[in-house]
Image (tube, grey):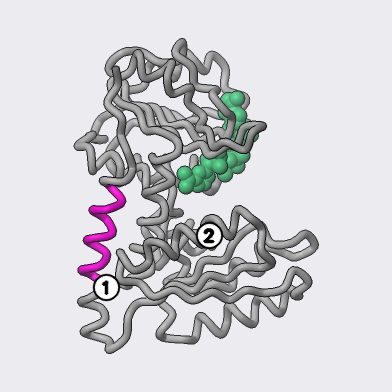
């Protein structure tokens, strides 16, 4: 039976480290780091994420403020709020919930976030930073959470073959860059990949970020592997499910992250850690 790589331990360690940094920041600056959430409307998934961040902000020593904007706010209205937060020195991070309502030029709005406050790595500046190390910004939180889990459980990446299923700008691509920086050998798969199972079986570490319930089955894995499930999907009963068929896969591999309680738990901890500037 595989080891269950729960996210809570990794998240708790990161909250502790973040809190120490936040205390140092507060002493040096005379105010606490503060994450500003910008939310247009009240979509249930946004509210659920916000509740999770609020639950843990204190653990991380980060203050939280929310700018709730009406569903019919204009593009310029959102940009005005972002400008106000950019120039407020007490706001150290900005999280804009996406997607924005239809009709808004989302890219234009996102690009207004100051790169040093872009805690979820949404701007082009953050991408440049993640891909080349130039300028300022952050990697998106979820790919970073994958590395935090590996570090927590002593899973070394150096020289390992990591297969990533998914090539989105939010997870797959930035994750592959972060893995390369750790000297992993990375194969990125997507919906046009042929012979997916033979590639996933060749991995030392398999990360699935496809957004397909239960697509990683026992016949895609082999003994000795670590499997990290990034997928957050909901079945017809509204139950959260990962990409990995957990019971099937955990009979075979060495270690696997659960959903819920795996990568998602760590993502919030990474988000709050980004809201504390380096001191
Ligand atoms: P996305 O933009 O829909 O990208 C999915 C990727 O998976 C695409 O590259 C797609 O290939 C590939 N893919 C889809 N079906 C596939 C298949 N059958 N075989 C191989 N590749 C396949 O999704 P995303 O935003 O990256 O998110 C991926 C998952 O992670 C979702 O479940 C999402 O909810 C979850 N997520 C979790 C967190 C967290 O905190 N844990 C954060 C963000 C996202 P193509 O490029 O060819 O279409």
- Residue at the (28%, 39%) spot, across then down: 150
Q: Which mark is residue 145?
A: none
Precedes in sequence: disc 2 or disc 1: 1
Q: Position of residue 11 (x, y in %)?
A: 31, 51
Does residue 21 show up magenta in the picture?
A: yes
Q: Position of residue 20 (x, y in %)?
A: 20, 68
Q: Position of residue 193 (x, y in %)?
A: 57, 22
Identify the image quadrant of residue 57. Answer: bottom left
Label 2 belongs to which residue?
Answer: 122
Q: Which mark is residue 22?
A: 1
Q: Position of residue 78 (x, y in %)?
A: 66, 75
Tag 1's secondary structure? helix
Identify the image quadrant of residue 248. Answer: top left
> CB of residue at label 1: within 8 Å of ligand 1?
no
Q: Is residue 246 left or right of residue 71?
A: left
Tell me where the magenta segment starts and ends, as one range. 10-22
Mark 2 is surrounded, within 10 Å at the Cα level, by few (under 14), some (14 to 19) or many (20 or more) other residues, namely many
């Amino acid at each position: 039976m595989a080891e269950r790589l729960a996210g809570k331990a990794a998240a708790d360690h990161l909250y502790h480290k973040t809190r120490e940094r936040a205390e140092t920041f507060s002493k040096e600056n005379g105010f606490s780091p503060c994450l500003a959430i910008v939310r247009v409307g009240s979509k249930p998934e946004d509210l659920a994420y916000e509740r999770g961040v609020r639950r843990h902000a204190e653990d991380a020593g980060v203050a939280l403020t929310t700018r709730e904007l009406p569903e019919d706010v204009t593009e310029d209205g959102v940009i005005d709020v972002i400008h106000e937060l950019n120039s407020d020195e007490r706001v150290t991070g900005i999280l804009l919930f996406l997607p924005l309502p239809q009709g808004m030029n989302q890219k234009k709005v996102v690009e207004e976030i100051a790169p040093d406050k872009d805690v979820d790595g949404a701007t082009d500046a953050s991408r440049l930073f993640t891909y080349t190390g130039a300028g300022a910004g952050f990697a998106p939180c979820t790919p970073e959470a994958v590395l935090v889990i590996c570090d927590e459980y002593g899973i070394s990446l150096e020289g390992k073959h990591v297969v990533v299923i998914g090539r989105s700008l939010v997870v797959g691509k930035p994750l592959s860059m972060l893995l390369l920086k750790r000297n992993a050998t990375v194969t990125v798969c997507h919906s046009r990949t042929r012979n997916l199972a033979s590639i996933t079986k060749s991995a030392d570490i398999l990360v699935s970020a496809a957004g397909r319930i239960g697509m990683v089955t026992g016949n895609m894995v082999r003994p000795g592997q670590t499997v990290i499930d990034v997928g957050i999907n909901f079945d017809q009963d509204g139950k959260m499910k990962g990409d990995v068929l957990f019971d099937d896969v955990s009979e075979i591999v060495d270690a696997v992250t659960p959903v819920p309680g795996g990568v998602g738990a760590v993502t919030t901890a990474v988000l709050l850690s980004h809201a504390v500037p380096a001191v």
